[in-house]
Amino acid sequence: MNYDFKVVVAGPFASGKTTMITASSDDPLVGTEAPTSGDEAGVKALTTVGVEFGSLSYEEDGEAVELSLYGVPGQERFSFMWDIVSVGMDGFFLLVDASRPETWTNSKAIGEYFARLSRCPVVVGINRVDTDDPAAVSRVVDEIRHAVSMPGATYLTFDVMDRVSAQNALMELLLLMLEQELRDPILLEAS
């Protein structure tokens, strides 16, 4: 059996969306980046102003899975793109930057927005955790779980710049989408 899932990757400005899709995709990123301006220019030189696209394929035991990855801008002024890109979304990946707590409220708002658009599986990927201490990582995850508050979501830490780490994070979402497909194939096809 073959599966093709549409995954939307969202999060605040500079949370790592472009980097994650670039790192995990089998093909070069198709992007819509433009120079930043104002306060944003102090954070990074380019920002997504449209939609980014990448894809990731898995094949095992004669079954193939294709993840079509759609990255959307994090700034509210580009939120009209969120409605457009979310059509047919099978899974949602919300990126949260652990090193910038001031963006967690924005992460929550973005997550809530997409939750209203679809009841698909959600993974909250926590990027830039600056410690290897398991107790400290657990505290950061708990703080973000409380701040972002996405009921039913899976929370995990990973490194957006590391191909294996980014792909493993997407694999978590894939497993949730496959579980939903097996539980209710009509729901997935209707989304």
Image (spheres, grey):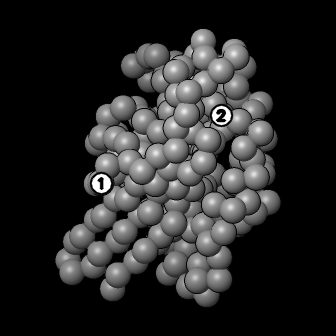
Where in the figure is residue 149, as x and y percent of width and height?
74, 41
Which image quadrant for residue 43?
top right
Label 1 or label 2, whichever comes before in sequence order: 2
Q: Amino acid at mark 1?
A: Asp
Q: Is residue 169 visible?
A: no
Q: Secondary structure at mark 2?
A: loop
At horizontal 73% and vertical 60% (from top left) the residue drawn is: 83
Q: Is residue 36 visible?
A: yes
Task: State which quarter of the image contains the C terminus.
Answer: bottom right
Is 85 located above or below residue 17 in the figure?
below
At horizontal 30% and vertical 54% (from top left) the residue drawn is: 27
> Which one is in front, 73 or 175?
73
Q: CA gap, disc 1 to disc 2?
A: 24 Å
Is 149 located above or below residue 58 in the figure?
above
Mark in front: 1 vs 2: 1
At horizontal 63% and vertical 60% (from top left) the residue drawn is: 85
At horizontal 46% and vertical 54% (from top left) the residue drawn is: 53
Is 38 located above or below residue 182 in the figure?
above
Task: State which quarter of the image contains the N terminus.
Answer: bottom left
Where in the figure is residue 187, as x and y percent of width and height?
64, 81
* View extreme (left): residue: 61
Q: Amino acid at mark 2?
A: Pro
Is 88 located above or below residue 158 in the figure?
below
Which numbered disc covers residue 27?
1
Kindly identify which residue carries mark 2.
12
Where in the figure is residue 41, as x and y percent of width and height?
60, 17
